[in-house]
Image (cartoon, rainbow, N blue to C red):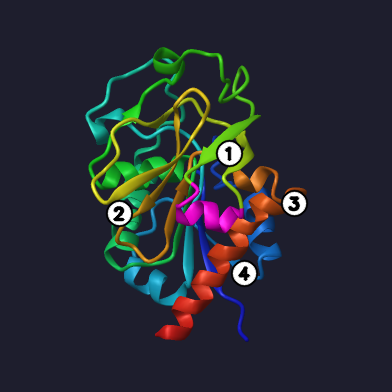
Amino acid sequence: MQPPLIGITTYGVDEDRKFTLPREYVDSVRRAGGIPLLITPGESRFDELLDLLDGVILAGGGDIDPQEYAGQSHETIYSLDAERDSTELTLARRLIETDFPTFAICRGIQIVNVVQGGTLIEHLPDVVGEEVLHRLPPREPTPHAVSVDPDSRLAGLLGQSEVTAMSWHHQAVRQVADGFEVVAHAPDGTIEAIESQTHSWLVAVQWHPELTAANDPIQQRLFDEFVKASIERRDEK
């Protein structure tokens, strides 16, 4: 059986004029049996791209411009990238419209929420305080508990409704877009995952499963099941 081709969005161009992406995303897809292909900001040929691919991961990274969701400027907002915003918002819209297998991680959950009309919390500590840390200073990952709705698709994928997740963000979903359902929370009430109510496979998490997937089979299952769904959709064509 031919391995599925999995697109992964990348960070924007850095100061050395290079596109980058943490290798953990690539490794997680390979462990699941997929072949990773990187989608860089500036891509616009989405018809050809989605004809080639079997699934797409919307990866983490810097913040979305608050203007995209009628938000407010904040001193902690960083790494704004208009080219990346434009590419990923357009891509996410196409993924939703075409019912394409989609796994959205961190920034990715924010992209799918914003493109459907949802909003974001510009800086979590201003809303939920710091009893639960969602990242360490200055900007480093940290683990915390996540409670998952036991009746959700996500709980079925994970195989349980309580997990320890690696968190690395200072923003999160505020108002959930129409068509999505909240299916996981952090102990402070922060929305940690949403699912599409109409899409056949669109799961979006605020944490970073790729960071621990190599040693945590529960987190790796998210990639395994996503790649499996991508194969099934391809075979149904």
66 displayed left or right of 63: left
For residue 29, above or below residue 72: below
Mark 1 packing: few (<14 Cα in 10 Å), some, or many (20+)? Answer: few
Task: Classify mark 4: helix, strand or loop.
Answer: loop
Q: Which residue lies under the disc numbered 4?
A: 34
Q: Which residue lies under the disc numbered 1?
A: 16
Task: Classify mark 2: helix, strand or loop.
Answer: helix
180 displayed left or right of 84: left
Residue 159 drawn at (x, y percent) = 61, 55
Name the quadrant containing residue 74: top left
Which mark, by number, is residue 90? 2
Residue 112 drawn at (x, y percent) = 35, 48
How far apart, in angstroms, are the residues tagged by discs 1 and 2?
Answer: 26 Å
Which mark, by number, is residue 214? 3
Q: Earlier in the sequence, mark 4 or mark 3?
A: 4
Seen from the viewer's position, the closer of residues 180 and 207 is 180
Q: Which of marks 2 and 3 is nearer the N terminus?
A: 2
Residues at discs 1 and 2 in contact (Cβ within 8 Å): no
Residue 158 on the magenta segment = yes
Comparing labels 3 and 1, the label whose residue is closer to the camera: 3
How far apart, in angstroms, are the residues tagged by discs 2 and 4?
Answer: 24 Å
- The magenta span reads 150-159
Mark 2 packing: few (<14 Cα in 10 Å), some, or many (20+)? Answer: some
Amino acid type at circle 2 is Thr
Residue 163 drawn at (x, y percent) = 62, 41
For residue 186, above or below residue 193: above
